[in-house]
Amino acid sequence: MSVLVYVENAEGKFKKSIFEAVSYAKAIADQLNTSLTAVSIGNVAQDELQKLGNYGAAKILNVNQDALKSFINQAYASVIAEAAEKIAASVVVLSNSFSGKGLAPRIAVKLNAGLVDGAISLPELNDGKFIVKKTAFSNKAFAYVELHADKKVISLTPNSYKIVEAGGQAAIEDFAATVKPTDLTALIKDIVRATDKVSLPDAELVVSAGRGLKGPENWAMVEELANLLGAATACSKPVSDADWRPHSEHVGQTGIAISPNLYIAIGISGAIQHLAGVSSSKVIVVINKDPEAPFFKVADYGIVGDAFEIVPKLIEELKSF
Ligand code: FAD
């Protein structure tokens, strides 16, 4: 019995959410009194792989094969399931990232495992029970899922578990996985964006704006505020529907669900569908000229006023630091 964590890379580098997943998997391995192995797919330098040892991985299975250069859900799921079988993993952990959302159920099917997607805390292990907490109904409730299967697959919501430095060293082992031609039928080409911007799903700070900003020409102040804070930018659905901002920034029920440490909402009413994707943010700041805007009901801090006056003042203040 052991624990496996899948460590996805972005152009050869691991993001913060991966160190969270490794720390989380290590804590589960400790609960089960076993060791943690990581599986990496793609071309990742040895010194980057070595970082995983610091968060608790004792061993790393390094899969670096030409056929797996591009991300293919089916093929990656097969490789991770094969790695899990190789080390007789009873628990497989991955980040509930964009690719993790597609991988977790596929791995669970391949391993005949129980699945919890979007876990937000460590499993409770009482009297042989294995219970995992996750959010449900668009973050309006918590669900406690009891897994009965011998094997378990858990995907961890980014920003919901702290990174813990264990200070260890990992042994790196090359792993030649079986790549089935049937897994390679849908080849997705990489879309590489030339941008230094903070990626929204992983962002700890998010500055978001809505229709209250009147038009795309007014986003310069949103971007400036985000840059000063080192934050990602986001928007409401009507904003991306109107092509004021790219769809990749749309948060909410039908967009990306995020849980940053700080969410600043500017000129967004706080419709239930918007809140569904952002209400698990740790701190919510709302700037809206309408004191009755529903967003204020869930805000930790609210500023009633005109965004075109308040945001430039915030920027000015931040620049003076
Ligand atoms: P508005 O509702 O128009 O609100 C604009 C706000 O800006 C107002 O509160 C106003 O007081 C304020 N404002 C105006 N001028 C200023 C100013 N100068 N300074 C400060 N404040 C100002 N929406 C999402 O965002 N995400 C989703 O995923 C999503 N999914 C949906 C799914 C379904 C099935 C449906 C039916 C709807 C969905 N919606 C979603 C749409 C949602 O219902 C709202 O219509 C939308 O969130 C409203 O966007 P908004 O707050 O930007 O615009």
Image: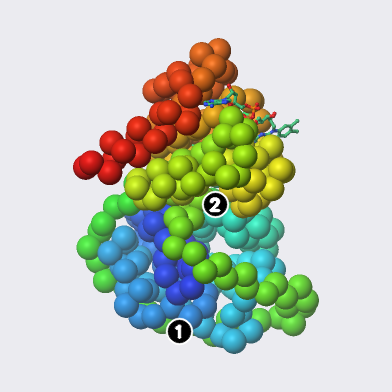
Query: Residue 123 at what x, y percent from top left?
Result: 45, 42
Q: Earlier in the sequence, mark 2 or mark 1?
A: 2
Name the foreground residue: 204 vs 230.
230
Q: Where in the image, quadrant-wise, is ligand 1 located?
A: top right
The image's colour scheme reads rainbow
Quarter location, residue 23: bottom left
> Does 278 sit left or right of 244 as displayed?
left
Amino acid found under the numbered disc labelled 1: Asp
State the mark number for residue 96.
Answer: 2
Residue sitting nearer the eye, 181 or 250:
250
Where 104 falls versus 192 (above or below)?
above
User: In the figure, 72 relative to 95: above or below?
Assistant: below
> Which disc is residue 174 wearing?
1
Q: Position of residue 41 (x, y in %)?
A: 52, 75
Residue 139 in sight here: no
Q: Residues within 10 Å of mark 1 (few under 14, many from 20)?
A: few
Task: Write down the quadrant of residue 125 in the picture.
Answer: top left
Q: Is residue 232 visible?
A: yes
Q: Residue at x 45, y 18 (%)?
A: 304
* Disc assigned to residue 194: none
